[in-house]
Amino acid sequence: MSTYRYHLGAYGRLVRYVGAIKTEVAIKVTISLGVNATYILQAVLMAQAVSLVFARSPLSALIPYILGALGAVAVRGVLSRIFEIYTKVMAAKVKTKIRFLVFDKILRLGPGYIHHQRSGRIQSMVLDGIESLEPFLVNYVPHIISIGITGIAIGLYLFHLDWLTGLVTIIAMLLCVGVPYLTVPLVSRSIVSYWRSYASLNAQYVDSIQGMNTLKAFNAGEKKGAELAADALDFYRKQIRNTTLSLIDSGLMMILMGIASCVTAALAAYRTDLGIITTGSVALFLFLGIECARPMADLNMYWHTSFLGLSVAEGLFEIIDMELSVTEKEKPDVQSLDQKLPDLRIRNLCFGYRTNVRKALDGVNLDIGAGETAAVVGPSGSGKSTLVNLLLRFYDPQEGEIRIGGVDIRDYGLEYLQSKIAVVFQETYLFSGTIGDNIRMARPDADDAAVVRAAQAANAHDFIMALPQGYRTVISERGATLSGGERQRIAIARAVLKDAPLLILDEATSSVDAQSEALIQGALEGIMRDRTTIVIAHRLSTIKNADKIFVLDEGRLVEEGTHEQLVFLKGVYANLINAQRKTYG
Ligand code: ATP
């Protein structure tokens, strides 16, 4: 029962979304009323023609009615075309609006949200999920409005002809609209599990395709294939169950419509026999009765196709309602970092991911002067990347503060703060498009010359020019056709182009060969000049020249000093260095 109430609640909210497309709904309802008017006109003219036949009128008397009915059919043909085209336009508008709304919210929720979701699930929601709202928003809502208006008009007219037969017709119509709602509890459960099964199947496919290399390398393709087959079978079963339930509901409705037509016809005939209504009116009841039943079948179809949107709406509202864990002040600071090279001051920084018991950072204090290069090192899982996440405000700390240029980073505008930090991440994400576009995303207004200068500074220009179309070379998804070192140099070119005063290099040299490392190292040294830089690295070569080195271990700051001082300490840092010497020589 609770699912039932919840779904009706979701429908209520969806109806409110229709408010955002009032004009479109009004236009569609008007066209639909035009189409219905042609059906009614045709029915009335045909009823007149039939009563003339019963009255044994000459054939010539029928001609105007038949021509009129043909005219109604022709007008309907034109209106129906316009109706179809407008439906497509309206659907595209509505879906774009909702997609924008949801995507904007996902962007604002940021990596803190994405990290805890399966990308396939989000993808099904934003693409197929929003697609499934179309029948409800674009078809069902306008249709029920136009049926309401047409139904009331026909009902009142029939009521005027004969109150009893008119009343039966109106009751039958109301039942046809209402009956499908009775099956909501049954259908809702089935449709929710259908959608979950679909989203999970989709997520499995996305996982498998993204992890294709690993599956092949570990010979795990067969096992994964079996899992996918099991999921596909589950999805198939849910689909069949869903269709069966829909058919029961539609069947019920068809029976109801059949009974209603028979009762109306019989009642009209009986009332004619009693002399209460005329023979001509019987024909009107019959023809208009059909006109009442016709849109009901469409309504039932729209209702069923709408229902999937319900279970999806539930997930969409979950995203839309989700509270932002990182928020901006009402009047954020958007200027303090404009002129100066910032220093960085971190006090008692504590942060734990909500899924983990152990804190990722626990009482960390750091001071980095303006223009200094500081290295943060530590064993795997010690909290280095978490520190970057907090600096970029992907998350906010539970305790403590980070001050950049003397201001708490929570006081800055979010976009402003992020525009002042250039990051070269551990893994470079390249979007499908040209190499030039990928570099330019750091500063979309940059001209070609600036892009080339950035690539030169990143030691990327030569390899880009060696590609078939230079900067216009389209790279495949995620840059799979480029080497790790090439991808990183593109990331460095982005950072150069961004020209931000604070630079973060997150293990930028960890996955490349010695030659690439030398090229990357050269590029990095160039851009580190005149910037406050934090290098998060394992490699000795990257950190040896740092002004300060901070050593993290299990989320705590355990050592700090220069390379020489820390080696002398013979602590965690010295152990890391020794381990590295043994590995790399
Ligand atoms: P590495 O050198 O291996 O990249 P790191 O020092 O950068 O490690 P972090 O990635 O900051 O370490 O991780 C610190 C701790 O937080 C680890 O225990 C890790 O499992 C956990 N962690 C990291 N990211 C998340 C996340 N998105 N959700 C939950 N836990 C996380």
Image (cartoon, rainbow, N blue to C red):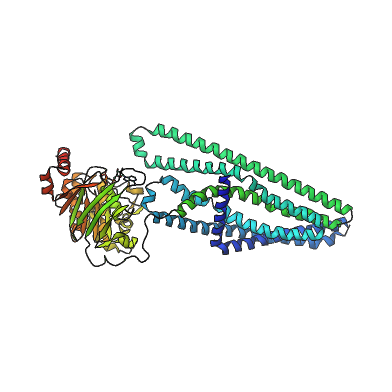
Q: Viewed as shown, does residue 14 lie left or right of 453?
A: right
How many discs appear?
A: 0
Q: Residue at x 43, y 34 (%)?
A: 225
Q: Residue at x 34, y 39 (%)?
A: 213
The image quarter in which residue 340 lies: bottom left
Q: Position of residue 334 (x, y in %)?
A: 31, 66
Q: Position of residue 128 (x, y in %)?
A: 49, 49
Q: In the image, ligand 1 is in what quadrant? A: top left
Residue 374 appearing in the image: yes
Which residue occupies the foreground of this view, 459 or 463?
459
Quadrant of the image containing the C terminus: top left
Q: Position of residue 394 (x, y in %)?
A: 33, 53
Residue 464 appearing in the image: no
Task: State whether residue 93 is above or below residue 237.
Answer: below
Q: Position of residue 566 (x, y in %)?
A: 13, 47
Q: Residue at x 89, y 53 (%)?
A: 274
Q: Residue at x 56, y 42 (%)?
A: 189
Which residue occupies the foreground of this view, 86 or 207?
207
Quadrant of the image containing the N terminus: top right
The image quarter in which residue 418 lies: bottom left
Q: Viewed as shown, does residue 148 lie left or right of 344?
A: right
